[in-house]
Image: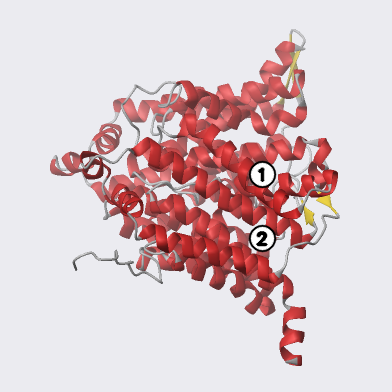
Amino acid sequence: MLAQQIVNGVVVGATYALFALGFTLMFGVLRVVNLTYGFYFSAGAFIALYFMTTGGLSVWVALPAAALTVGALSVVLDQLLLTRSRRTDASEMSSLMITLGATLLLYSLATAWLGADIRRMPAGLLGVASGFGGVRFTGIQIVILGTSALIVWGLFALLRWTKLGIAIRALAENSDAATLMGINTRLTFAIVSFVSGLLGATAGVLVGMNYNGVQPYMGETMILKGFAVIILGGLGDVRGAVVAGVFVGLLETLVAAYAASSLREAVAFLALVLVLWVRPSGLFGVSEARRA
Amino acid sequence: MEFLADFAFVYQSLIYAVGINGLLALSVYVSLSAGQLSLGQAGFMAIGAYSSALLSLKYDAFFPLALAMGMLIPALFAALISIPTLRLSGVYLALTTIGVGELVRVFFVNLDSAGGALGLSGIPEKGSFALIYGCLFIVLFGMFAFARSKFGRAIEAMREDETAAGTMGINFPRYRLAVLVVSAAIAGLAGGLNAHVSSFIGPAEYGFDLAVSILSFALLGGISNPLGPVLGAIVLTILPEVLRPIHDYRLAVNGAVIVIVMIFCPEGVFAWRIRRTGAAV
């Protein structure tokens, strides 16, 4: 029973980790809080659903296709909305405000167009369950764990070993110095936007499959949790985001199973407030006098 | 006069909403004017609404007392949460207050003695036009008076440049705490008034959407003087009513307005600065 709950919790946590990774990357490198990120989550799920139902594609094609489409959307929206505010000093605040408005606009358009009803994924999607010593994995859970592990590993490898990864880390560290070293700032920003959109959309498709429901506002609940996760992990910290994501998913599932299911929604925020109380720079943050 | 009476009857709830949103805009203005972006106003409003409504419903409390408690309890709560949040600033503070707001909402969803997810209904409709706009006027007047004072200037200095203000001897933690508490009390007042004119409140009303709307009032109007947020609230409350014919896209228009204003006019639409009395120009 406990082992099964841990498995379920880790699966939920994997989707949180994937979502938070793109969010924190956006913050750490682009230096903006982009709230439209939650919309990419919903958009990914809807586009994948469209490819599967209307387009008749299999999940294996629909998932990457949706992720790539949303990645491109993310680049376009980032350019449209944030180019101007990135030039000013207070870009964190003004980006937060601009993207707040954009989020309202995007969600309202999506709801007006698609309706607020919950839509189901095609029947029989990866529905095979397999067991290992009393613990059951559904096909979807295995796909979630596999995809997340692959993407997290791929992103870490990219950041660690490639020239692009070094450029990204340099930009996160000090964008002025990075520009002076000859890094193409605009291109690197665009690539980071693309990767973030990709991660958000993938998380959306996986969560849509895990709960078998897709709805325009699903990204809004997710982004609230995403905030909690990325602050817990420390803003801009990719390793922190993964650990905090799995931690929150696990904690939520265990609280729902052994304490009260109504508390599930509060777990992430409670953990956030309690952690900030004792460690103002997040669980894994290096201590600073003040976070700004 | 008959026309006015008809108008007041048809648009009564809109007129109330404009006043209440004006108060909410001022509550977020208080924290923004000190350079602190709080997205927890919806939570403070919920606490004010629930505490005053419960006092009215369960204990049949004297209405001004219920309203006063609707201000005091969120203020105390704000003082309590300031223990972890005073050390945070900028985006950290904004994101953490979102978390606090969500916690409050989930608390009320689970509070069975306050109707849980269904909310409270049958709250006596004791609020009135005069009361709401009276409160709005008093708060607005108080802020103008405050902005001209030494403390108002200190807070403005804090917003513009923390380091410079600090060297001038401004005590940040005390000002921050005061700002948070006052802002929570005003949001609580708006909540109490709203509960007593709409007769129903439910936890779903006080979600992240509301926090965002409140912030958008202040941003549209600009935060260089207290009148800006109120004008922003008026515009953004009335706009959806004017746009009723395209009802599906009403919020989309609100969103578009916020985006365009924030990109091209980051200081807000109604931006001008109050001069300090006796200050040399």
Label 2 secondary element: helix
Q: Residue B48 vs residue B109: left or right?
A: left
Depth check, front residue: A117 or B41: B41
Depth check, front residue: A169 or B3: B3
The answer to which image quadrant residue A128 occupies is: top right
Identify the residue at image location x=77%, y=79%: B9
Amino acid type assigned to the residue bearing label 2 in the image? Thr
In the rendered image of this protein, does residue A232 appear above or below residue A24?
Answer: above
Q: Which mark is drawn over residue B47? A: 1
| Residues packed near mark 1 inside 10 Å, few (<14), some (14 to 19) or many (20 plus) | many
Depth check, front residue: B1 or A123: B1
Q: Could you tell me if residue B219 is visible in this image? A: yes
Identify the residue at image location x=63%, y=36%: B103
Q: Could you tell me if residue A146 is visible in this image? A: no
Identify the residue at image location x=65%, y=42%: A58
Counting from the top left corner in percent of width and height, residue B11 is at: 72, 77
In the rendered image of this protein, does residue B138 appear above or below residue A159?
Answer: below
Q: Which mark is drawn over residue B110? A: none
Q: Which chain carries label 2?
A: A
Amino acid type assigned to the residue bearing label 1 in the image? Ile
Label 1 secondary element: helix
Q: Are marks 2 and 1 in contact (CB under 8 Å)?
A: no
Q: Mark 2 sits on what residue?
A: A111
Depth check, front residue: A154 or B94: B94
Quadrant including the C terminus of chain B? bottom left
Q: Are marks 2 and 1 on the same chain?
A: no
Q: Residue A231 vs residue A46: left or right?
A: left
Mark 2–mark 1 Cα distance, whole angstroms, equals: 30 Å
| Residues packed near mark 2 inside 10 Å, few (<14), some (14 to 19) or many (20 plus) | some
Q: Mark 1 lies on which chain?
A: B
Q: Which of marks 2 and 1 is in front?
A: 1
Quadrant including the N terminus of chain B? bottom right
